[in-house]
Image: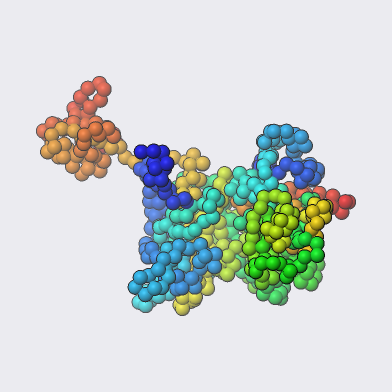
Amino acid sequence: MNRSTDLARAMVPRGTVPFFPELAARKRTVEARLWDTFSRWGYREIIPPLFEYLDVLSQGLAPETVAAGYKLEDRQDGRLMVLRPDVTAQVARMAAARRDNPATPHRYAYQTGVFSHTDAHRGRPREVFQAGVELLGPGGYSADAEVLALLITALRDLGLDDFIVSTGQARYFKAILGDLGLSDGVGAELTRAMGRKDVPSIRAILAAAGVDAAKADRVARIPLLIGGREVLETARGLTKCADALAALDHLEKVAEALDSCGLGRHLSMDLGEVRDMDYYTGVVFDVLAPGMGIELGGGGRYDDLLGRFGHPMPAIGFALDVERVLEAIGRAGVPLAAEGPLFRVSGTLPDAHRAAAALRARGLNAVVALKNDTGGTALEAQGERLFRVSAQGRQPVDVETLVSEA
Amino acid sequence: MNTQTPITVALAKGKLLDDTLPLFVAAGLDPRGLDDPGRKLLFESPNGDRFLVVRAADVPVYVEHGGADMGVAGLDVLAEYPDELYQPVDMRVGYCRMSVAAQKGVGLDDRPGTRVRVATKYPRVAEAHFLSKGLAVDIIKLYGSMELAPLVGMADCIVDLVSTGRTLKENGLVEVETIWESTARLVVNRASMKLKHARLAPLLAALQRAADEQGSRS
């Protein structure tokens, strides 16, 4: 076979990755540990379908997400469907459609892939493995604090320590924007400039809109309201708008709640964070770790999303990108628990099978040796007896000894 | 992360680099060796800060992917970049304008064909500009010497960066419209902005001060 045929056969779509056992084991360990934390906090699994009707789900998606979705046609009725681009919108749709109305709060956890088209050669995956939660029902600061505390705890349970959750408050900028009384077009332009912390453009937009200089100066300081708790005080000084001040009080209560459970040191503020403003309605946050130029995950409060599916309900959630979390763990040098040892049992088939079953019954991993098998620690079964085979020869051993060594 | 955390800065060789260095020095950085980089690509200051010499169009790539915490790029580069980066400081150097130019005396309505064809190195800028005017155009991407395209009848006009306008003039083209004028921006990685905030906040303020002083002098 020539080389180009080899390459053609090996080709996978760009932006997908094959996980062989070594890497897959690391991924599963991380996912299992996240899942464990989510479960212990009372979050229960929700499984959304792999594809949805495009027109239905689009009601809860940003236009860019819709545009980047993989679409396929439903042969039954010709409607367009989209491959899961975002779990939160699906959970919102599912919760809004549910007719048996279970009592809130609903605590949901998920672990699944999301898909999107990406530009070629930008180093971005098209299948992203996510683990996340959604808390539906309560809208107060204690719900925000619960979700942030869970996020921080889940990362700490993975052995990560050096990370921050950079948190903003969508309501703060929205209130100030409303107060400025700009036209929709100019407001959208200002919000985009705010999103890229583009202070020069913010000044230019406000000047062109005839906003007075002192007020414009205060707005131009918002993008750099980044740092610790002191930022809240600075932010209060920039506005008299009651809604904006209430939004800051809310964020401060969230911060105090995290302090009281000893997790406050991971919390950092960025009040200029206005990403996805038509989606997020309150706290909005990103997880950042040194050496990672991109967030490990993020989330926020999206109180209007369920309403778009006909059943308004406050909600907040986050999603972690499992591959990025794995990379952060690798960079931080945190060891991940290895898989247990594997035993390879040879001997006559009945003897080997009996011995392997005994090992498995005691929680050990065992295979019956096939031709050319080389993995794991070699054992030999002979009747009821078991031997450990090494370069030094055969040593009798019993299952209990192997269990105590493992 | 404290105020001494080292940072990595991506810069492009050329006039923009020469104009930017004094501002960096004024803001307290130590980009020694960069005034005469030769073939060296990586420079390190005694305090651990690193300076990378990259192609202009690669500055946003390094910054977005975290290869650099920050960089300096012209709006021509940023406007073609598909994602929006943090760009908090106007460096007030590297002035340029993006313009539409056509052959002298030839209006777009005089074109022989049915569609407006635009030759440019900046397809995103050109497309957005004509779309905002309700004009659907065919974009022909070129990598240089765009002035030739109208002369040989390959395009009706060009969208290009203009600094003095001499090249246009020498090739019989005139600017018919300015799309925007700009100076270079400091771009900052999203994660660095927050993780290294204690170091970056005073640095950004010092850079803007230095740029404003320099800008008001020139």
Where is B187 relative to A1, above or below? below
* Residue A201: percent from left, percent from top: 73, 62
Where is A184 relative to A293, above or below? below
The quarter of the image holding the C terminus of chain A is top left
Q: Is residue B90 visible?
A: no
Q: Residue at x 67, y 40 (%)?
A: B52
Q: Residue at x 59, y 59 (%)?
A: A167
Tag count in the figure?
Answer: 0
Q: Residue at x 18, y 33 (%)?
A: A346
Q: Is residue A394 visible?
A: yes
Q: Is residue A130 left or right of residue B58?
A: left
The quarter of the image holding the N terminus of chain A is top left
Q: Quadrant of residue A291?
A: top right
Q: Is residue A296 left or right of residue A28?
A: right
Q: Residue at x 46, y 46 (%)?
A: A326
* Residue A351: percent from left, percent from top: 13, 36
